[in-house]
Each structure stands twice: as structure tokens, then as C-alpha cells.
Amino acid sequence: MTIGKSPRRSAPDSSAPIPAEESSRATAGGPSIGRQLARARIDAGLTVDQVSTRTRIRVPIVHAIESDDFERCGGAFYARGHLRLLAREVGLDGEALVARYDAEHGGPAALPAGQLLDTGPIKVRDHNRPNWTAAMVVAILAVVVLIGYNLVGSSSSGGNQPGAASAPLPSGVSAPATGSPSAQPPAPESSVAAIAAAPADKVTVKLVAGADKSWVTAKDGNGKSLYSNNLEAGQDQTFTDPKKITLVIGNAGAVHLFVNGKDLGPAGQDGQVVHLTYTPGDPQAG
């Protein structure tokens, strides 16, 4: 007795498993919907991954459709859309497959309100992941606010004093006045009273700017610079040293001079540059 060998059936694509038995949904006249799609894909020389990339239908759903499992589609509406996309890629009549699907699974359903065809991967937002975009926006706003605060602060504190010294003054030199140029210059009587008690064993020189500014340099008895800057209108500077104070004053007429408690009046004429030296005792111009 001769036993005949049954013909071998090779799987068309290992990436798309097809059940050994024909789907219960297949008609007597041909293969099932999923079998048709799988065979057409293989005939077109395409893999499941390639079809998934072109149609933006996820690989597990393509496998499920080729196995006639339409539950993975998420409903009849989405199943019809997937069938049309897959049929177009593998060269089948999508409308014919949809009509067969409706005949086997019920009539077409209306589009659910507010839903769209799922043709791409589902993006799930990770709520535990930091929102870098929001953090960056907050950081940029903080920098802008900080810059604006610094600009406003610098303009309000020093905007009216362009010639004010930015470095700390040496020992024995008083800080410049913070009055604006529009302020009235101090009266000479108050300046005299401020240095009337100057020590007799030292030289004390006070400069008071009137209605205009002047450029001033001051050095002590050792030649060390005590001050080198503009003296704005209404500002004053006081210098003290055991030996002597040497001055260079530009626009001398704008500066009122007090030496060792005595009012010497203007240091010179308007626009004049003078060189002065004072020592302890009676004022004497050097």
C-alpha cells in the first residue's frame, strides 16, 4: 500500500502568522478578509513592518487584521478605515473589503462624535516626566525680570550722577553727596560749621560744588591719590591728612573751598584749572 505525501504548506510571512484553519468568517467562494490582505501583501513583496510604516497602523493591529481579529481595531468604524488603508497599499479593492466586512459583521456605523481615525501610534503622556518647556519659559521670564530690576535700580540710584566714583574712597575721605544736579547747593555757613572743629595738627580741606560741576583730583602728603572724579553740582568732598593736601581743580569757579575751618570762597575763576596745596595751620596756597 502506497502512502501519498500531502503537499507542504509554507507560511507566506513569518512576521504575520495566519491560523492553520480558515477563518470562520471566510465565505465559500474564497479566503477570508485577513487571508486576502496577507496574501496580497506577500505578493507585493512587503513585510508587516513596511505596511505599518506606510499606513501608520501599528504592527500588532496589522497582525490581528490579517488573522481576522478585528477587536484590536477598537470598533467597526476604525476597522473599516484600516481595511481601506491596507487594501490600498497591497493593491486590493478597499471598498469591496469594507462591504464584505459589513456583510459579515453588521452594517456601517456612524462616526462617533469627537473621534478620529487612529492611523498612528498612540502617544501617552508621562506625567512623571518633568515639563522642560514650562521650566525653560519660567527661567527666561526670571532672567528678564532680574535684568529689568537691575536696570531700574541702577537708573534710580545712579542715573543722575554720571561722574560719581564707583570705587570705595580711601580712608579720611568722605563719601560724595547723593543729591541730584538740580538740588540747591548747600549754604557756606553750614559747610563752615561742619569743619569748624577740624583738628589743629592736621590739614582739613572741604570742597563744595555750586551750581555747576568741576573735575577734581586730591592727593595726600605721601602722594597717594585720595580722589579723582567729577564733583557734581551740590556734592562735596572732605580730605584730611597730617602733612598736606594737594589739589587740582578744573572749572575752579564752580567749587567753594574751606581749609582748616576757614571759608576761602571760590577756588578760582569759571573754567580755570588751579593747582593748590594746603598744610596744617593757616591756609597757604602752594
Image (tube, rainbow, N blue to C red):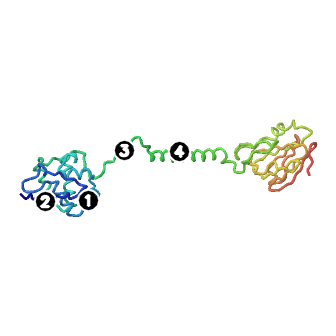
Alpha-carbon span between mark 1 and mark 3: 30 Å
Q: Residues within 10 Å of mark 3 (few under 14, many from 20)?
A: few
Label 3, on which residue?
Answer: 125
Q: Nearer the viewer, mark 1 or mark 3?
A: 1
Q: Residues within 10 Å of mark 1 (few under 14, many from 20)?
A: some
Q: What separation in Å lies between label 1 and label 2 (alpha carbons)?
A: 25 Å
Please give the name of the residue rendered at 67% of the width and 48% of the height, measured from the top-left corner: 160
Residue located beneath label 2 in the image: 7
Instruction: Give how far across and how far down residue 59 sits, in percent.
Output: 27, 52
Find numbered disc 1 in the image and state the secondary structure of the residue it sits on. Answer: loop
Look at label 3 and name its amino acid.
Answer: Arg
Q: Is residue 29 left or right of residue 217?
A: left
Three-letter amino acid code at the position of disc 4: Ala
Residue 47's disc is 1
Question: Would you name the residue on which mark 4 appears?
Answer: 142
Q: In the orientation shown, which residue stands out farthest toward the bottom?
A: 44
Q: Are marks 1 and 2 in contact (CB under 8 Å)?
A: no
Q: In terms of sequence position, does the residue under pointer 2 or pointer 3 come before the other?
A: 2
